[in-house]
Structure formats: structure tokens, C-alpha cells
Amino acid sequence: MAEVTFERILKWRLLPRGMMLVMTYAYLQTLFWFQSLPPDAMTTQAAGLTATVTGAMTGAFGLWLGSEKS
């Protein structure tokens, strides 16, 4: 029974899909946080954090799409 469940998890690629959902949620929360900042609080540090998270999300999404098997 455990082998069948594990094979289904691997076949349906649930872990990578779940990780992408979590990363997408974190990315959206970062964007919403940055957009809610008042203009005087939009420092280079806040912009740098947003740019870093955006870059990480872009890289992860590219790797995820490149690893999909058709």
C-alpha cells in the first residue's frame, strides 16, 4: 500500500507542484507587502528584497518548467 501511494506521489509530481504553490503564495505576499508600503518607506532595501524574491521565483519557475516531462 505504501509503495503504491509513493508511486502515485512521484507520478503526479505532487511535491514539486506543492512547492511551486507555496513559493507563488510567498511571492504574491511579498508583492502585496511592497505595494502597500507608503512612498517614504519604499527604500532600496525593500526594493532589493522584492527584486531578490522576484528573481528567485523566476529561476524556480524556469527550472520547474524545464523539468516537466511531456
Image (tube, rainbow, N blue to C red):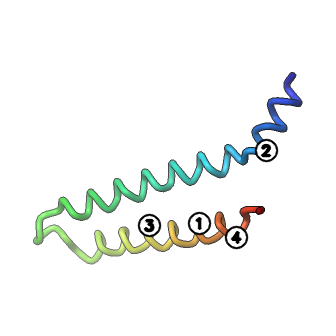
Which residue is identified by label 2?
10
The front one of 70 and 43 is 70
- Label 4 to label 2: alpha-carbon separation: 17 Å
Q: Earlier in the sequence, mark 4 or mark 2?
A: 2
- Viewed as shown, does residue 11 lie left or right of 37? right
Which residue is identified by label 1?
60
Please tell me which residue is depicted at 81% across the width and 35% down the height of the picture: 6
| Percent x, y of residue 12 | 73, 44
- Viewed as shown, does residue 34 lie left or right of 24? left
Disc 4 and disc 2 in contact, CB within 8 angstroms: no
Q: Earlier in the sequence, mark 3 or mark 1?
A: 3
Disc 2 and disc 3 in contact, CB within 8 angstroms: no
Which residue is identified by label 3?
53
Please tell me which residue is depicted at 48% across the width and 74% down the height of the picture: 55
- Label 2 to label 1: alpha-carbon separation: 19 Å
| Percent x, y of residue 65 | 65, 67
Type of the residue with mark 4: Gly
Which residue is identified by label 4?
66
Q: Quadrant of residue 4?
A: top right
All told, the count of numbered labels is: 4
How busy is the neighbourhood of tag 4: few (under 14 within 10 Å), some, or many (20 plus)? few
- Label 3 to label 1: alpha-carbon separation: 10 Å
Q: Earlier in the sequence, mark 1 or mark 4?
A: 1
